[in-house]
Image: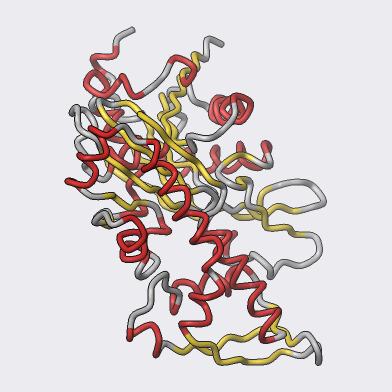
């Protein structure tokens, strides 16, 4: 098998294939790419015009013959061909266009995906040029990336809030003791802001604007600073059909996101209720770790602490936790190899 030189091959790659962003880690180099998971395609001849950041700028702004697509929805591949195309593009970018020997890949995926969805990720990676594909559950990767001592016999709880899914997991001894995956995360928060603007302010906005509002004045828990936050939002007025600017306040946006946040809190509580008492004691001791882009929502750690009574910390670099975890597994394969289950391996013997 030759796993001993797994880390020494600089072409091995760890990938966080996310609904909102894709990150790539190359062993020996670290994180080499962080781009939105968006592809712009020419409708007529189905060729890609832009991938990543350039394509994201086109969302909601394309002429008739161009479509900007997000190939992943709720953490899983919704459009297989586009996902494969995006992966190929990112792999080529990482290797600066050089012809490469087929790399090994460790890819982070949501823990709640079905066997068919796992297969789709493996097939897309193999079509994109991988030799072997290893799938790792995102919460496990996030915990390793956040520096939690997953190899020790102590309970660690991680909440990984991405674009499409929220993963709540209790880990011990390199394994998942229990986990829950809910398909409510950053995208859902954006959708709630979009609906709120339409319902209350009669203003139609796009998903990019909704995300900008969430980042600028969104919060999960009341604080004085957020209550004073005001933002000018431009969009299309429903009644007049003309562009208009509306002023919105922080508390309105917090209110609009209350429902999806409640779903996330419920998933956390359900997981805690099912946790074995010894591990629950460890979690009370160590606290809960928040990772993923959603961890950047102001006051979310306070809200979770308030609802569960357990101290909640935000990881040092929440956006990179999953990809850093895949990279650490690549570089310490012998110590961390147990994090894969047999069903998560693919041998490409072509």
Instruction: Compare residues 179 and 244 and report the one nearer the observer.
Output: 179
Quarter-of-image position of residue 259? bottom right
The number of discs equals 0
In the visual, does 255 lie left or right of 297?
Answer: right
The residue lying at 57 percent from left, 66 percent from top is 190
Can you give x and y, in whole percent of width and height, for residue 173 in the image? 25, 25
Looking at the rendering, which quadrant does residue 77 occupy?
A: top right
Instruction: Give the residue at x 17% y 46%.
Output: 285
How are the colours assigned in the image? secondary structure
Vertical arrangement, residue 79 with respect to residue 349, above or below: below
Residue 255 position, x and y percent, is 52, 75
Query: Is 208 situated above or below 305?
Result: below
Q: Position of residue 206 (x, y in %)?
A: 65, 72
Of residues 81 and 337, the one nearer the viewer is 337
Say which quadrant the C terminus sits in: top right
Q: Is residue 43 above or below residue 193?
A: above
Which residue is found at the position 29% from the left and 29% from the top? 329
Indicate the quadrant containing the N terminus: top left, top right, bottom left or bottom right.
top left
- Residue drawn 35% across the image and 59% down it: 304
Height in image: 190 above or below 167?
Answer: below
The residue nearer to you, when weighing 227 against 28, is: 227
- On screen, residue 215 versus residue 123, left or right, reads left
- Residue situated in front as seen by the camera: 118 or 10: 118
Q: Residue furthest top?
A: 1
In the image, residue 216 lies at what x, y percent?
44, 77
């Amino acid at each position: 098998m030759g796993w001993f030189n797994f880390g020494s091959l600089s072409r091995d790659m760890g990938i966080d294939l996310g609904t909102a962003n894709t990150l790539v880690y190359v062993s020996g180099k670290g994180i080499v790419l962080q781009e939105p998971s968006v592809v712009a395609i020419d409708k007529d001849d189905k060729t890609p015009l832009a991938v990543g950041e350039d394509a994201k700028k086109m969302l909601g702004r394309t002429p008739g013959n161009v479509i900007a697509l997000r190939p992943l929805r709720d953490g899983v591949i919704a459009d297989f061909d586009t996902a494969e195309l995006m992966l190929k593009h990112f792999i080529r970018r990482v290797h600066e266009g050089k012809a490469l020997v087929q790399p090994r890949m460790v890819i982070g995926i949501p823990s709640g995906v079905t066997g068919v969805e796992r297969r789709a990720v493996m097939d897309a990676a193999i079509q994109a040029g991988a030799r072997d594909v290893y799938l790792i559950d995102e919460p496990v990767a996030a915990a390793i990336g956040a520096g939690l001592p997953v190899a020790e016999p102590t309970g660690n709880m991680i909440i990984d809030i991405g674009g499409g899914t929220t993963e709540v997991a209790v880990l011990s001894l390199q394994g998942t003791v229990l986990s829950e995956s809910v398909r409510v995360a950053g995208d859902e928060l954006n959708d709630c802001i979009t609906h709120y603007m339409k319902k209350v302010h009669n203003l139609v906005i796009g998903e990019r604007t909704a995300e900008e509002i969430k980042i600028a004045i969104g919060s999960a828990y009341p604080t004085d600073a957020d209550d004073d936050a005001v933002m000018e939002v431009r969009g299309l007025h429903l009644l007049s059909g003309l562009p208009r600017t509306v002023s919105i306040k922080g508390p309105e946006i917090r209110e609009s996101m209350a429902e999806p946040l409640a779903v996330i809190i419920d998933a956390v509580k359900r997981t805690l209720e099912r946790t074995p008492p010894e591990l629950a004691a460890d979690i009370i001791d160590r606290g809960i770790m928040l990772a993923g882009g959603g961890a950047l929502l102001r006051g979310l750690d306070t809200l979770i602490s308030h609802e569960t009574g357990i101290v909640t910390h935000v990881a040092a670099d929440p956006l990179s936790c999953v990809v850093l975890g895949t990279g650490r597994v690549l570089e310490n394969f012998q110590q961390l190899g147990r994090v894969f289950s047999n069903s998560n391996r693919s041998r490409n013997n072509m």
